[in-house]
Amino acid sequence: MSSMYDGYKKKLKEAGYKLTPQRIAILSAIEENKGLHLNTEEIYDIVKQSNPEMGLATVYRTLQLLEELEVVTSLNLEDGCVRYELYNDDGHHNHHHLICSNCGAVIEVEGDLLEELENKIEKEYDFEILDHKLKFYGICSKCKNLV
C-alpha cells in the first residue's frame, strides 16, 4: 500500500474508522482519474468493475464520510452533479477551476491565487479563512478556435 494510503489510514483511524477495501477502491478511482472531477455515479461505475458487490449506496455513504474527514472535497460545477477530488497533502484545496460555458470542460489552475487576498481579509476582519473555492466561467481555447 502506498504512502498516499498511509495518510488516509491515519486520518480514518484518528476518527475511529478503518481503511476498508471499499474505501481504498473509491479513493483509487478518484486518484487514478485526477482532474476529471468524477461524480458519484462515475466513481461507482469505475469501482464496480473490480468490486461488483459494492452498491451505489456504499459509494454515496463513503464519499460523505471522506468529505466529513476532509479526505475528499466536493465540487459543484453547476451541472447538476456533485463532483469529487482529493484534498492535497496538507489538507487544503489550493487550486481553482476554469469552466467552459460552451462545452463544460473543466481546467484546473494549480496554485493558490488568493493567498495575498486571504491574508488581507484575515488581518482586516480578524477572520480565519479555512478554505475557499474559486471558479471562473468563460470559453476554453478549443471552443474559441471553433468560432
Image: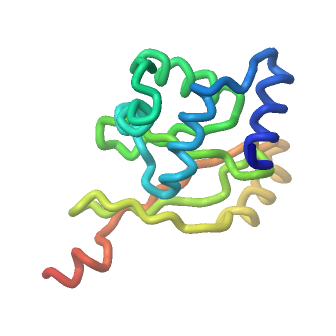
* Residue 82 appears in the figure: no
Q: Residue 82 placed where, x, y %?
A: 41, 35
Q: How many numbered discs sit on the rendered protein? A: 0
- Nearer-the-camera pick, 53 or 145: 53
The residue located at (23%, 62%) in the rendering is 103
The residue located at (67%, 23%) in the rendering is 20
The residue located at (48%, 53%) in the rendering is 33
Q: Residue 123 placed where, x, y %?
A: 85, 53
Q: Is residue 2 left or right of residue 80?
A: right
The residue located at (81%, 40%) in the rendering is 6
* Residue 57 appears in the figure: yes
Q: Is residue 143 left or right of residue 19?
A: left
Q: Give the residue at the far bottom of this rendering.
A: 145
Q: Is residue 4 left or right of residue 59?
A: right
Quadrant for the C terminus, please.
bottom left
Question: Looking at the picture, does residue 58 appear above or below residue 78?
Answer: above
Q: Residue 104 placed where, x, y %?
A: 28, 57
Question: Looking at the picture, does residue 101 appear above or below residue 51?
Answer: below
Q: Quadrant of residue 55?
A: top left
Quadrant for the N terminus, please.
top right
Q: Residue 34 placed where, x, y %?
A: 52, 55
- Nearer-the-camera pick, 38 or 45: 45
Q: How is the image coloured?
A: rainbow
Q: Give the residue at the far left of this rendering.
A: 147
Question: Looking at the picture, does residue 49 appear above or below residue 65?
Answer: below
Q: Quadrant of residue 49?
A: top left
